[in-house]
Image: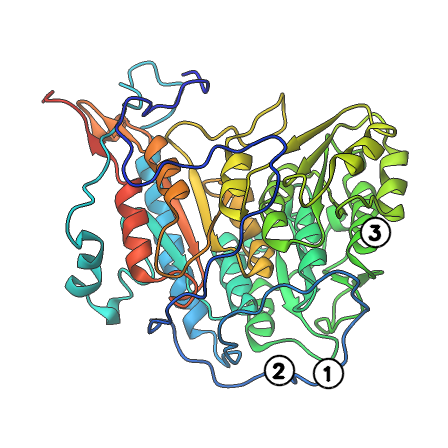
Amino acid sequence: MSADRPINADVPAAGEPAATPEPEPKAAAERAAAPTTLPTAAAKPEAMVDKDAPAAKPKSTPPAKKRRRRQPVPGALKGIAGLVAVAIVFIVAAVIGGSGGSKSDSSSAGPTAAPAPSTEGPAAEAPATQTSEGLGYPAFATGNTTRVGGSDPATNAAGVALAVFPSTTPAQRPAAVTLVAEDDWAGAIAASVLMSAPVRAPVLIANPDGLPDPTSEALDALDPQGDKSTGGVTAFTIGELAAPDGGKTRVVKAGDAATTAAAIAELRDGLFGSAPAHFLIAPSGQPELAMPAAAWAARSGDPVLYAEGDLLPEPTIAVLERHKKVPVYVLGPSSAISSKALGAIEKISVSVHRVSGKDAVANAIAFARYANGSFGWNVNDPGHGFVLARDDSPLDAAAAAPLSASGTWGPLLLSDSATTLPAALREYFLDVKPGYTTNPTRAFYNHVWVIGDQEAIDVNQQAEVDELTELTKIGGGG
């Protein structure tokens, strides 16, 4: 199937048209207003890590926007275990059901353009009123979505790590984990590259003076032991952070965003034993635009570096100078990383390309669609996984990154509201909506991981995503 023509090109668009990413847009759009707070189905937390602990390192980049309400860290693994159980059920179902949908199967009818779901009436609210909260549906899962519903990135990171590494046997455990500070979103996104093979170290959240309860309890289950791919290391810490007892820890020197990312890129080269295929440069001053880089780094092994405005920082220049023949891709519009900065990169690297959208939502969609040779997701047809998070929680991008390097291997998409699915994202889901003519077991399927509790993305938005992702029958064939 050609990726040049979307599978649902002839489907009438519903709602407002999606924004078309510009190669050099003039300015990034304003962030959406604060969302309405709704009740959450996740278990309520009990305790909080010391908020007065000193920062692990200086920060020279603007901090991420704070979440609407800071929840304390839970003291038990019950909530995480429930999410993981749901995740594992989906993974097993996907493997069994997806085995009939191989794209190389000549007997398959193949994906077919599917009609848009109806927008009349309050259909999206029906699942919330017709299902039992006690069963965790649809707050935790629907037929086409699975939620990792933590109230903070530490809980989400623990839930994702256990979903990807169930750890019921030694073979299901990671050799190492990567620990990042809860105030270092830029370091966390850059550290997502360590989730790529051969290292495959999921990101967990730590503090200089201790480990949050979800991190500690996830580590007990994951029980990393180190191996040849990690040099025997069981935990990589980005900066001086608390680490689990009894294992071998390697500390990555941290500083500002560019310095930390350069140090992680150097560590990556040593662990992987080879130069990267590409570099991805993200804006250090606009975290919502940098978020999609985490998923790609975990999937590809391409390091994330940072720039901002006209500035190409010295640590970024030093990494590029060591790898002049490696192509560079810049994520974000010219309002975030300017054409002048691109010009500075062009003086060093063999080639430079920009991938961008006018705002966080459009930027993530543009990156999901993009392809240039071996770089890019090229997700322009049905049969894919996706990860959906809020654009105001950049640490969740790193927490969710392992989902993009396992299971259904999907790009990170962003919503700018707790209650309303962005029009551009709705149009994108419609464009890749799966359909079949005669045999649904031979079709391709989409699945979406939803990251965060209902204060991040509420159940009605999740239900709409489920409807947009549902396999739909086309035509009158029997």
Distance (Cα) linking label 3 and label 1: 24 Å
Badge 2 local density, few (<14 within 10 Å), some, or many (20+)? Answer: some
* Secondary element type, mark 2: loop
Q: Is mark 1 on a helix, strand or loop?
A: loop
- For disc 3, the neighbor class at 10 Å (few under 14, some 14 to 19, many from 20) is many
Kind of residue at disc 2: Val
Pointers 3 and 1 in contact (C-beta within 8 Å): no
The residue that label 1 is drawn on is 53
Q: Does 219 sit above or below residue 236?
A: below
Q: For the N terminus, which image quadrant?
A: top left
Q: Disc 2 and disc 1: Cα gap in Å?
A: 9 Å
In the structure shown, which secondary structural element does the residue marked by tag 3 occupy?
helix
Q: Quadrant of residue 41?
A: bottom left
User: In the image, is residue 29 above or below residue 445?
Assistant: below
**Which corner quadrant of the image does residue 442 belong to?**
top left
How far apart are the two marked residues, 2 and 3, measured between alpha carbons?
28 Å
- Lower position in the chain sequence, tag 2 or tag 3: 2
Residue that carries the numbered disc 3 in the rendered image: 263
Which residue is more in the foreground, 134 or 26? 26
Mark 1 neighbour class, 10 Å CA radius: few under 14, some 14 to 19, many 20 or more? few
The reply to whether callout 2 and callout 3 are in contact (CB within 8 Å) is no
Identify residue for label 2.
49
Where is residue 355 shown, x and y percent of the image? 62, 33
Across and down, in percent, residue 430 comes to 32, 35
Q: Which residue is located at x 24 percent, y 35 percent?
A: 116
Q: Are marks 2 and 1 in contact (CB under 8 Å)?
A: yes
280 horizontally vs 159: left or right = right
Q: Is residue 411 visible?
A: no
Mark toward the start of the polypeptide (3 vs 1): 1
Q: Position of residue 350 (x, y in %)?
A: 81, 23
Amino acid on which the number 3 mark rests in the picture: Ala
Q: Which residue lies furthest to the top in this view?
A: 106
